[in-house]
């Protein structure tokens, strides 16, 4: 009985060490791949859609509110179109 228990514990230990080693290789190779991709393929510069949309000049007090509304509209369009949609013009509906 003691030999069976010792053999089971040995197999358990070898298995756990093997899994730890393989997972360590996966993590290290993933980090290396990320560094290589970031070095040779840097992310493209992202233009802010807030600068592209032009409105008529509102008063000073409503500018901050318009910026917040514009940011919310741009964020909603970005989420709904998965980053593919662009805002060309914003008009107030009567």
Image: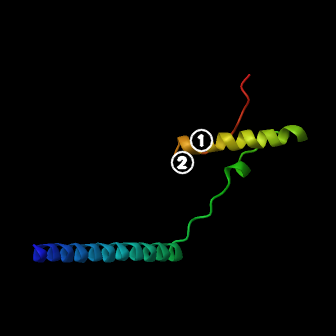
- Residue 77, image x and y in percent? 59, 41
Instruction: From the viewer's side, name the closer residue of 50 and 69.
Output: 69
Determine the secondary structure under disc 1: helix
| Quadrant, the C terminus | top right
**As drawn, 28 above or below 66:** below
Instruction: From the viewer's side, name the closer residue of 4 and 63.
Output: 4
| Quadrant, the N terminus | bottom left
Looking at this rendering, what residue extends furthest in the front direction?
A: 2
Instruction: From the viewer's side, name the closer residue of 14 and 87.
Output: 14
Q: Residue 84 bears which disc, if any?
A: 2
Quarter assignment of residue 65: top right
Instruction: From the viewer's side, name the closer residue of 22 and 37.
Output: 22
Label 1 environment density (alpha carbons within 10 Å; few <14, some 14–19, many ≥20): some
Query: For the point 78% across and 39% down, which residue is it?
Result: 66
**As drawn, 61 above or below 30:** above
- Residue 59, image x and y in percent? 89, 38
Q: Residue 54 bears which disc, if any?
A: none
Quarter assignment of residue 25: bottom left
Q: How many marks?
A: 2
- Residue 2, image x and y in percent? 13, 75
Query: For the point 37% across and 75% down, which residue is it?
Result: 24
Query: For the point 34% across and 72% down, which residue is it?
Result: 23
User: Is residue 21 something one can see in this rendering?
Assistant: yes
Q: Residue 77 bears which disc, if any?
A: 1
Between discs 2 and 1, the one toward the N terminus: 1
Q: Is residue 70 left or right of residue 61?
A: left
- Residue 68, image x and y in percent? 74, 42
Q: Is residue 57 left or right of residue 1?
A: right
Judge depth for marks 2 and 1 and give the one in front: 1
Determine the secondary structure under disc 2: loop
């Amino acid at each position: 009985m003691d030999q069976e228990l010792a053999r089971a514990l040995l197999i358990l230990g070898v298995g756990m060490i093997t899994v730890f080693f393989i997972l360590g290789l996966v993590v290290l190779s993933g980090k290396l791949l990320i560094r290589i991709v970031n070095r040779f393929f840097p992310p493209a510069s992202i233009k802010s859609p807030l600068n592209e949309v032009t409105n008529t000049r509102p008063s000073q007090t409503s500018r901050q509110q318009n910026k917040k509304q514009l940011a919310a509209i741009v964020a909603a369009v970005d989420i709904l179109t998965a980053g593919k949609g662009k805002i060309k013009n914003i008009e107030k509906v009567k």
